[in-house]
Amino acid sequence: MPMTMDPNAKFEVALKGDEAMDAEVRPRFHCRFLSCRQWREIAGAIDELDGAAGGAEVLDRVIEQLERCVAGWRNVTDPQTGEPMAFSADRLADVLTMAEAQELIQRTLEGRPDGTDLKNSPSPAA
């Protein structure tokens, strides 16, 4: 079965800024594998950002695309309470900086798990 057809097939992405954290507590984003059509649509939307009116429009478009790709997270905690946050796609804008959102969308388009996670990848090439 193609990974894009399996609702349970996801890969994890850790942001580069979190690489120094212990693996057990490092925040991870669970991303869906994209079909060619989905990849093209998302990449096209990102390419159109050059013509965006301003920073708010760019941020809205990036978050909108992330909401299509990110299916969950782990080790994401509320900065006020330190308690784990339940995943909700509409909370991505609350937990990511603009630079982190751009990194996450790029890593999702690459469609590859973190190098440390290759042994757990559903991909036969891993």
Image (tube, grey):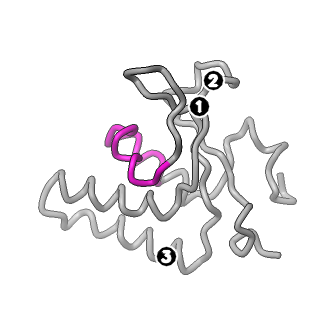
User: Which residue is denoted by mark 1 in the rendering?
Assistant: 75
Q: In whole angstroms, how far apart are the C-alphas of marks 3 and 1?
A: 30 Å
The reply to whether discs 1 and 2 touch (Cβ–Cβ < 8 Å) is yes
Say few, some or many: other residues with alpha carbon within 10 Å of mark 2 (under 14 / 14 to 19 / 20 or more). Answer: few
* Amino acid type at image mark 2: Val
Report the magenta stretch's main SS: helix
Magenta span of residues: 88-105
In the displayed structure image, the side of residue 3 where residue 95 appears, left or right:
left
The Cα–Cα distance between marks 1 and 2, rounded to whole angstroms, is: 6 Å
Instruction: Rate crowding at label 3 as few (under 14), some (14 to 19) or many (20 or more) other CA atoms within 10 Å.
Output: few
Residue type pointed to by label 1: Asn
Tell me, for residue 25, which label it has, or none.
2
Name the residue located 58 percent from the left edge and 43 percent from the top edge: 73
Q: Give the residue drawn at x 62%, y 75%.
A: 35
Which quarter of the image is occupied by the N terminus?
bottom right
The answer to whether 63 is drawn above or below residue 42 in the figure is above
Location of mark 3 (residue): 40
- Determine contact: label 3, label 1, CB under 8 Å: no
**x, y percentage for residue 10?**
69, 56
